Image (cartoon, coloured by chain):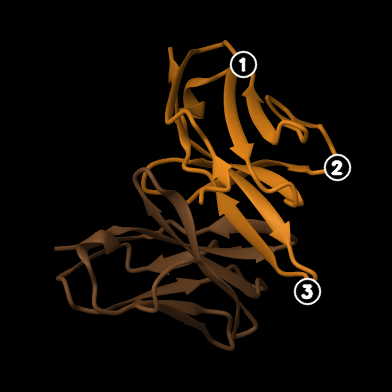
Chain colours: A orange, B brown
């Protein structure tokens, strides 16, 4: 059962335009969400996070929006740059009563920025 | 500060063999998690260790096991390898709820 889904395996965007990456989840108990960026042959690197009590978080060119009623979050990158070409993973975190945290990742979306 | 280090980077094994992968976390990080990345499956959680104790486990068969040492270094072992175990295995160490990943070990089972 895939609790975190990224339904678009790939996305191509013109340089300078806005890239919108989407993520859906099924568990309403997730405590917060993260986006990771991954280049080939490297481990994922953290991009931005959002708490489940917020609906927006912004960091430079990256903004994450959370719609709890729709169980949907999105990552906006504007303006898109060639270096943004990578695979983007959405992840959700569930905290247990004992303080443990478990990350569940989506399957990733390959973003290609066209010069 | 050195990042998360995984060894080896690449590995080729034959079916039925066993393999051990190693992960050295960032200094000061006590939590180490392991993930398997395969095309179409994304990143799947294997297990998490904290202070030498496994405190979370994903839905993988018992052939996948791990351990953590007193210096927080962790090893992952896969026994009786199957072709479907070919994947990139990523280790992450965590502090303040943020995971930092190593470059991964690319395992190919032939």
Q: Are marks 3 and 1 in contact (CB under 8 Å)?
A: no
Quarter of the picture containing the N terminus of chain B is bottom right
The residue that appears at 77% across and 36% down in the rendered structure is A68
* Residue B96 position within the rendered picture, expressed as x and y whole percent measured from the top left: 75, 61
User: In the rendered image, which residue does mark 2 sit on?
Assistant: A53
The residue that appears at 62% across and 23% down in the rendered structure is A77
Cα–Cα span, label 1 and label 2: 27 Å
Which chain is indicated by disc 1?
A
| Badge nearest the viewer, 3 or 1 | 3
User: In the rendered image, which residue does mark 1 sit on?
Assistant: A79
Observer-nearest of A82 and A31: A31
Disc 1 element: loop
The residue that appears at 59% across and 85% down in the rendered structure is B52
Quarter of the picture containing the C terminus of chain B is bottom left
Observer-nearest of B67 and A46: B67
User: In the rendered image, which residue does mark 3 sit on?
Assistant: A98
* Residue B5 position within the rendered picture, expressed as x and y whole percent measured from the top left: 46, 66
Tell me: A45 left or right of B60.
Answer: right
Disc 2 element: loop
């Amino acid at each position: 059962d895939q609790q975190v889904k990224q339904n678009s395996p790939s996305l191509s965007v013109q340089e300078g335009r806005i890239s919108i990456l989407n993520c859906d989840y099924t568990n309403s108990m997730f405590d917060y969400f993260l986006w990771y960026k991954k280049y080939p042959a490297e481990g994922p690197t953290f991009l931005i996070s959002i708490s489940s009590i917020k609906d927006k978080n912004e960091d430079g060119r990256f903004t994450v929006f959370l719609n709890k009623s729709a169980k949907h979050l999105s990552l906006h990158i504007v303006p898109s740059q060639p270096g943004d070409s990578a695979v983007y993973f959405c992840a959700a975190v569930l905290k247990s009563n004992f303080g443990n945290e478990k990350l569940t990742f989506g399957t990733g979306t390959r973003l290609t920025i066209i010069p | 500060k050195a990042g998360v280090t995984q060894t080896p980077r690449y590995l080729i094994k034959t079916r039925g063999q066993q393999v051990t992968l190693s992960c050295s976390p960032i200094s000061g990080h006590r939590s180490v998690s392991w993930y398997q990345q395969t095309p179409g499956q994304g990143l799947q959680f294997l297990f998490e260790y904290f202070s030498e104790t496994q405190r979370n486990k994903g839905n993988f068969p018992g052939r996948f096991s791990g351990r953590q040492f007193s210096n927080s270094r962790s090893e992952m072992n896969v026994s009786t390898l199957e072709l479907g175990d070919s994947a990139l295995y990523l280790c992450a160490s965590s502090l303040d709820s943020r995971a930092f990943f190593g470059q991964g070990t690319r395992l190919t089972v032939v």
